[in-house]
Image (cartoon, coloured by chain):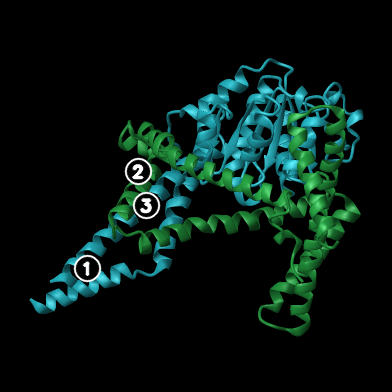
Amino acid sequence: MEERGTERRSLLTRLSLIDRRILFLIIFACAAIPLLIGASLKMSVTAPVKGLYDAIDALEAGSCVWLAADYDPGSKPELSPMNYALVEHLFRKNIKVISASLWAPGPPLAQTVFDEMAPVHGKHYGVDYVNLGFKEGREAVMVSVAEDLRRTFPEDYAGTPLDSIPMLKGISSLKDIDMIICVSAGYPGIKEWIQQIATRYDTVIGGGVTAVSGPEMYPYIQSGQLVGLLSGMKGAAEYEQLVGRPGLGTAGMVAQSSVHVMVVIFIIFANIVYFLEKRRARR
Amino acid sequence: MRTEIPVAMAFIAGMLMVVSLFVPHPFIAEPAAVMRGWAIIITAFAYVLGVANIARISLHTVRNRTTDWQYKAALVVALVAMAGVGIAGGINSGGLFDWAYLNMYVPMQATMFSLLAFFIASAAYRAFRARSVEATLLLVVAAVVMLGRVPVGEKLWPGLPAFTEWIMEVPNMAAKRGIMIGAALGAISTGLKMILGIERSYLGSD
């Protein structure tokens, strides 16, 4: 009896101290297998995602939006699918897009999206979209663009003066922009656009953030300062579903689902082991 | 004078920015716009200082062959190579800089970030224990939100996404709003103290 107790105790101890490489291997399998077999899952669309879709859908053809690519490669798997889905919707609606970034690594990521999407929709640089590149200065740049676009960005990403870009004729500041869409991974990002621009210049703002930043944005949605929000890869997948273009977000949903389920299983299992050990110790 | 002049400059710059928010007259708006331009230029200089500093520290480590000097050497080589390629060939799409950025920097940084999933899973297994009522509450809510934020949660219980949204929109938002209001009041107080010269730690000490 005593022997069996010791045996079980050692098994519990071993389970609680399981080699983390085994955990890593399980997580790797959960993430990799669904991606390799290309499984997909349907999902319902949440209100913040629908809010952004409706706000963009309400814009008329020929409107102009500011698409802030405020993220870096670390957040690319979560945020690039959003950028693709948003550009798809904007191009489909014949809305002009001005992209700029307050994060140094942002412009090439935004450019990659345009390079892929523009030929598909027959859009041309300088006529339907521009990439203004990166500007350091954070909140000062936001307010400066709101006052005078050309003083802040005299040239685009490729070094072309803004006055020689046909699409930008008649656009002198953010006051001439119909909506700001910010895809952001942190500071400076969507929160700063809201704080500096939304109320001061009466501008419509929407966007997308990493899943970890999502909860922080909910007060702005309720206050109406944020018309809609895509939160994490799930937000991107929901938007892809709305625009009818399954992409990287949708592809990642099964992988993300299985990893989340596995983490919950880990938590439950580890707690069962913890309580069994505790009970045994009390005896 | 070493204290008074910087404090006076901070007062003028700070007040100008505050007043420009309420007074759109060109008499205020123009100098405020010029000052914002200065702010952008000064912030850009932080990059120059940052690069100079990291180069100095890394070269010092390489020269003295201290711990992990090989990594510092790789950093200096990468820094010089990327800057050289960018300055010589430009940073536009299709160039060598763009190629190196998209094919080296992007996968490397994405890899670093993706490692988080493994560490979170390991931490959840080892440290997430229902040791108290608060910890149990956190654990249960975390599990619900984790499942509710992915499509499989909807398959387990169709009401889960709506319940998760309720958690986000009510308890989460109440807590977030409290934190945000507290932080904003703190920022206003610190800003006023700096503008009025009460808080002078930004001047440094010598």
Residue depicted at x 63% and y 38%? A190
Crowding near the residue tagged with mark 1, few <14, some 14–19, many ≥20 C-alpha atoms within 10 Å: some
- Disc 1 marks which amino acid? Glu
Chain coloured cyan in the rendered structure = A
Chain coloured green in the rendered structure = B
Query: How far apart are labels 3 and 1 at the CA level?
Result: 22 Å
Q: Position of residue B127 (x, y in %)?
A: 37, 63
Instruction: Confirm or deny contact between disc 3 and disc 1 (CB under 8 A).
Output: no
- Disc 3 marks which amino acid? Met
Q: With B31 as the anchor, is B115 left or right in this view?
A: left
Name the residue carrying label 1: A277
- Can you say whether B45 is above or below A167 in the image? below
Dot label at residue A262: 3
Q: Chain of mark 1?
A: A
Q: Position of residue B164 (x, y in %)?
A: 38, 37
- Can you say whether A188 is above or below A124 in the image? below
Q: Position of residue A268 (x, y in %)?
A: 29, 54
Q: Chain of mark 3?
A: A
* Badge 1 and badge 2 both on one subunit: no
Name the residue carrying label 2: B144
